Amino acid sequence: MMTEPLTVQQMAQRLKAADDILILCHKNPDGDTIGCAGALYHALTAMGRSAAVLCSDPIPPMYAYTRMQLFTGQFAPRLVAAVDVASIQLFGENNRMPEFSHHVNLCIDHHTGNTGYADFTLLDSTAAAAAELLYEVLMEMEAPITPQVADCLYTGLSTDTGCFRFSNTTARTHQVAAKLIEAGARVQELNTLLFDTKSRPRMEAERIARNHLEYHLEGRCALIYLTRDEIASSGVDQADLEELTSLPVSIQDVLVGVTLRQQPGGSYRVSIRTAKGVDACSIARRLGGGGHARAAGCELLGNLENAKSAVLAEVEAELDAQEKE
């Protein structure tokens, strides 16, 4: 499928000219897709447009402050825009999503592996988050950056950079964050909510995952896992599970951290996080997935031992190739 690339200016023009806009998030929504959807929704409605947000999965309660209107069929969409979604597979199948995800007009994204599924795409892989890119689009649209919009954009920016700790953080990321603070983003409250507050179910899932901690490849790889029964018994929210993925790689001398989470259907969702110089995307791509240089993922069928073996074989291949360079 061929998409036509757009500049920030061209994307702004197309959004400005549209009405009855449906904004699509990816399944298992994270702070970036939710933050972008919220910011775009509030900016468009402030400009007198009709807009709503659709996600295959529920928006986690912790993001209730984004206060966006979810789509319940209140208008017939005349333009469908996706935010932070790299491929059609990531939209999910619930909540009427397939009705709209098979023909997406506009896409704003920062993933190098974007498959070009939309008619028109604004793609910048140097942006730390889709929210960083959307900020530029909204400025070009002359949309009001209200405190509400600033909160939403800051959510995307901070969550995709691990509160500005990850290697994708650039000077531009900090410049956009500064503009959002000036616009009224509630940085202290949001940082506390997003990074310093853990629900009891999240702590329980973390306890179980730590109990499953394994070291492989002479300690260069650390691995944790959760079965679907353990996830269900902990009561943890899917969005909270995303946060667990940074645990294994935070251990001293570990170069690759792997987190396996069993999905309701039985497959394993694999998250790969790497230290500087090790390509997580390369590991994930060989397993049918993709992502960024330091954070990537894939989904594997089969039982836990098979999933572990498949991932570890590719981790070893990547580490060996890196040593030979």
Image (spheres, rainbow, N blue to C red):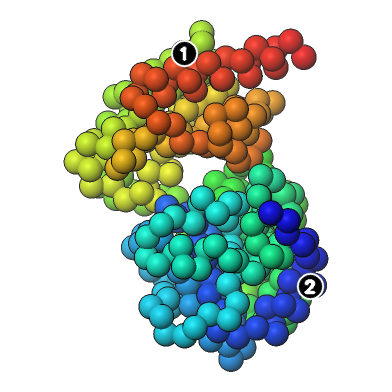
Q: Nearer the viewer, residue 18 or 136?
A: 18
Dot placed on the residue nearer the N-terminal end, 1 or 2 = 2
Q: Quadrant of the N terminus?
A: bottom right
For image coordinates 52% across by 63% down, the residue present is 101
- Measured as percent of width and height from the top left, residue 310 is found at 48, 20
Q: Nearer the viewer, residue 225 or 90?
A: 90
The relative height of residue 170 versus residue 57 in the rendered view (above or below) is above
- Measured as percent of width and height from the top left, residue 89 is found at 51, 50
Q: Nearer the viewer, residue 93 or 212?
A: 93
The relative height of residue 274 versus residue 41 in the rendered view (above or below) is above
For image coordinates 37% across by 35% down, the residue present is 267
Task: Count the numbered circles shown.
Answer: 2
Is residue 158 left or right of 215 when viewed as pictured? right
Question: SS for tag 2?
Answer: helix
Mark on residue 278?
none
Q: What is the three-letter code of the residue carrying label 1?
A: His
Mark on residue 216?
1
Asked which quadrant contains residue 223, the reply is top left
Extreme-bottom residue of the structure:
48
Q: What is the three-letter code of the residue carrying label 2?
A: Gln
Tell me the mark number nearer the camera, choosing from 1 and 2. Answer: 2
Q: Is residue 298 visible?
A: yes
For image coordinates 64% across by 57% down, the residue present is 117
Q: Report which residue position mark 2 lands on.
A: 10
